[in-house]
Image (cartoon, grey):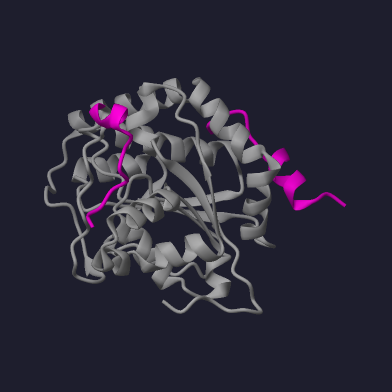
Amino acid sequence: MVSAATEIIASENSGLDGGWTVVLPRHAKRHRARPKLLFPKQKNQSWAPNDLQIDVGRESKLMQKIQICMKQLESSRFFELFLAQIHDHTVLDHFVRVLHSEPKMEMVIYGIGSIECFESPRLQLCLAILMKGKFDWIGDIKVFDPLLSATECRVLEALGCSVLTVNEEARRPAVKPTLFFMPHCEAVLYNNLLEANWRVDRLRNLALFGNSFGSYEQHLSLVKDPAVADSRKYILAAAQSFGVEFRIQTVSDYYFNAFHESCWHFFSPDNGHGLPIV
C-alpha cells in the first residue's frame, strides 16, 4: 500500500500547466519591505476595487511582469530549497496530517499587497502559484487584499485565482484542509485566523505560511506590554502549547524583502487535554 507521504512526493509535476511587524536584525533594516496596510476593522464587509476602469494595456504589462518574475523564481536556488524543505519528511508529514483523507487543500492568500506596484508581493504571489503547479494536492487559490485594483483582480483571475469579494479579516473557518498563505501580514490577522479556528478539529485542518510566531513571542518577552500581549494571545497560546514552525531560507538579498522570517506553521492540539483558555 502506498503511503500518503509517498503519494504527495509522487504528485510533483515538472511544469507549470497591529500593526506590529517582526523586528528585523539591526544589519537588515535597510532591506525592510513596505509594510502592508491593516484590514479595515469592520467585520465581513463586502468589497470591490475602487477603480473599476478596464485597462488592457496595464493588464498586459502586469501579466508580463508576473511571467518574468515566475520564470526567474522557478529557476532560482531559493525555490529549489523551498521545494526541498516541503519534501523533507519533517515538513511533509505535517502536510499529510493536514490533508488526512482529503485529496486537496484549498489555498487562501490574505494581505498580498499590490502586485502591480511592488516586487515583493509579485514574488509572494508567484511562489504560491508555482506551488500549485508543482503539487497536485494544492487546490483552488482564493485571494484577498483591500489594496487590489481592478487591473490586479483581472490579472489574478487570468492566472486561475479567485478574488474574494468579502473582507473576512482572516477569520475563515478551516472546515476542510486549508493552506493559508499570509507572508508578512500584520499580527492581528494571524491572531484572527487562530481565534476563528480555536477548535481541535479546525486547527488540525490548517497549514499556515506566515511570520515567525517565535519572533512575536520573543518580542513580547522583551517589551512586556500587557495590551499588546492580549492582542496576540492566540498566537502566543499556539506557539507555547501545540504549534510548530519551520523557517524557510531566503538564500540571498533578492528574496529577503519578500520572505524574511517566513515560516511554515502547523498545529497539533491534543484531543485529550483540549485547548488552552485564552
In the rendering, at what x and y percent does residue 255 appear? Answer: 38, 27
The x and y percentages for residue 175 are 52, 70
In the image, residue 247 above or below residue 84: below
Measured as percent of width and height from the top left, residue 245 is found at 53, 50
The foreground one among 205 and 221 is 221
- Going 73% across and 39% down the picture, which residue do you hit? 10
Residue 109 seen: no
Residue at 42% across, 27% down:
70
- Is 163 magenta? The answer is no
Which residue is farthest right?
A: 1
Dominant secondary structure (helix, strand or loop) of the stretch shown in magenta = loop
Q: How many marks?
A: 0
Side of 90 where 142 appears, left or right: left
Q: Give the range drawn in magenta.
A: 1-30
Q: Residue at x 20, y 50 (%)?
A: 37
- Residue 24 among magenta residues: yes
Q: Answer above or below: position of 73 versus 138.
A: above
Residue occupying image coordinates x 58% and y 79%:
274
Front in this rendered view, residue 43 or 30? 30
Residue 191: horizontal and vertical position, in percent? 36, 64
Residue 232 sits in which quadrant? bottom left
Describe residue 1's horizontal placement relative to residue 104 as left or right. Answer: right
- Residue 154 or 184: which is nearer the viewer? 184
- Would residue 13 be visible to someone looking at this image? yes
142 and 159: which is toward the camera:
142
Name the quarter where the C terminus is drawn. Answer: bottom left
